[in-house]
Image (tube, helix red, strand yellow):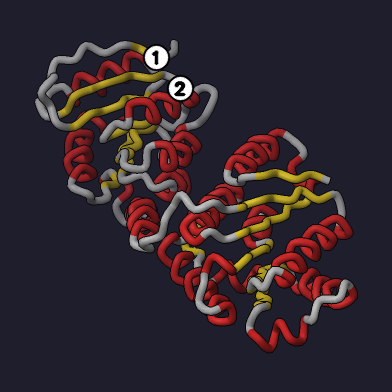
């Protein structure tokens, strides 16, 4: 079963709800229970994961009641995607999964609550009331567990928007946020050397965030290609940082914290801009922070970080270059991440 039309009994209601559940009897139970509250208006029912993501993006519901065991895409992955396509939607999991680890993973997506199906009769409406107040709700069956993640993730989404809006910059400024998919280290070094050398020659300041091995090799190559690296470093036009150490300054619960990222990045840009008469648009950046996270198996963190870099590139008109080993995108999961990574960039180079 795919999308199922719902009868709207409460057209004047203020809270729009999307129900995602593959079991028809339980879905009817959820709709019936929610229907007891006149302020709740069910605007859609979906029985599988991919369509749940599509419907959430299309309808932008206030509340999503979400199962985990779904066809095509499990509920946890649905929640991760919905965070991006419909960030204002509050997510409440109602699932038969009773493992504390599963609950933690579910809440870590940014969901606001978790109720076991066996307890939904007594807890569903209580949970809905709580999450719509902006609180976290975890079923009484899990009392004694200290779950974290939901509140942080939800606030992070809002802080991303408000923080970038507060920059007061023109988000229509032309920018370059490119990605290089490289076949070997020679390709990586050639690409970065060309990018950095061109920026320095144009009188820009450059921020490089890479592994120690790549940073050392880049410095030697740039010098060999005629760049006055000693002068650039002394003038503050060349800032070189370690990828792992830099990532650690803004990571929270294995995800980039937008507020922390913004603070760290803005400070770096301000420092670099001092060397070019305080003009952020004359700063370029290249690096491996997101690829470093991807190499650790933190795909969602890498994608979110690329999105944050894209936002700040737009806000300040920066030129940004990232680089990933081409071989790391081979395989099933890699292909999905490949598409998401590419979507966050203005240009994709391969080779």
Res. 4 visible in picture: yes
Determine whether 237 is above or below 248 in the image.
Answer: below
Distance (Cα) linking label 2 and label 1? 7 Å
Q: Is residue 89 left or right of residue 135?
A: right
Marking on residue 51: 2
Q: What element carries label 2?
A: helix
Q: What residue is rendered at 26% in x and 47% in y?
A: 137
Q: Position of residue 31 (x, y in %)?
A: 24, 20
Instruction: First in sequence, mark 2 or 1: give its number.
Output: 1
Q: Where is residue 253 in the image (x, y as percent from the top left)?
A: 48, 60
Q: What element carries label 1?
A: strand
Q: What residue is rendered at 29% in x and 52% in y?
A: 143
Q: In this view, does 228 lie to the left or right of 296?
A: right
Task: Tell me which corner region of the image, top left, top right, bottom left or bottom right, holds residue 196.
Answer: bottom right
Cβ–Cβ below 8 Å for labels 2 and 1?
Answer: yes
Which residue is denoted by mark 1 in the rendering? 3
Res. 100 visible in picture: no
Q: Quadrant of the N terminus?
A: top left
Q: What residue is rendered at 16% in x and 22% in y?
A: 35
- Near mark 2 (Cα within 10 A), the count class, few <14, some 14-19 or many ≥20, is some
Q: How many labels does the image show?
A: 2
Q: What residue is rendered at 28% in x and 43% in y?
A: 139
Q: Position of residue 209 (x, y in %)?
A: 66, 69
């Amino acid at each position: 079963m795919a999308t199922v039309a719902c009868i709207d009994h409460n057209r004047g209601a203020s809270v729009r709800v999307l129900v995602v559940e593959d079991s028809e009897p339980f879905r009817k139970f959820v709709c019936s229970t929610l229907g007891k509250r006149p302020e709740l208006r069910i605007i859609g029912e979906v029985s599988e994961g991919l369509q749940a993501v599509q419907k959430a993006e299309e309808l932008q519901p206030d509340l999503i009641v979400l199962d985990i065991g779904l066809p095509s895409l499990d509920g946890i992955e649905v929640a991760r995607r919905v965070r991006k396509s419909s960030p204002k939607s509050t997510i409440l999991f109602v699932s038969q999964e009773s493992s504390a680890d599963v609950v933690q993973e579910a809440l870590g997506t940014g969901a606001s609550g978790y109720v076991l199906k066996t307890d939904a009769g007594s807890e569903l409406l209580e949970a809905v009331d709580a999450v719509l107040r902006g609180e976290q709700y975890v079923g009484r069956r899990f009392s004694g567990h200290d779950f974290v993640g939901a509140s942080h993730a939800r606030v992070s989404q809002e802080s991303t928007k408000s923080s970038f809006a507060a920059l007061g910059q023109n988000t229509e400024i032309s920018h370059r946020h490119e990605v290089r998919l490289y076949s070997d280290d020679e390709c990586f070094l050639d690409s970065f050397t060309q990018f950095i050398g061109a920026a320095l020659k144009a009188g820009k300041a450059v921020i490089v965030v890479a592994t120690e091995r790549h940073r050392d090799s880049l410095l030697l190559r740039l010098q060999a290609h005629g760049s006055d690296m000693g002068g650039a470093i002394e003038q503050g036009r060349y800032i070189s940082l370690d990828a792992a150490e830099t990532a650690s300054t803004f990571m929270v619960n294995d995800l980039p914290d937008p507020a922390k990222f913004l603070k760290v990045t803005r400070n770096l840009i301000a420092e670099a801009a001092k060397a070019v008469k305080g003009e952020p648009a004359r700063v370029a950046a290249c690096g491996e922070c997101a690829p470093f996270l991807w190499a650790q198996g933190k795909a969602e963190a890498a994608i979110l970080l690329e999105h944050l870099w894209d936002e700040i590139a737009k806000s300040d008109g920066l030129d940004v270059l990232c680089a990933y080993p081409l071989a790391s995108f081979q395989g099933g999961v890699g292909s999905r991440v490949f598409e998401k990574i590419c979507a966050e960039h203005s240009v994709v180079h391969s080779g």
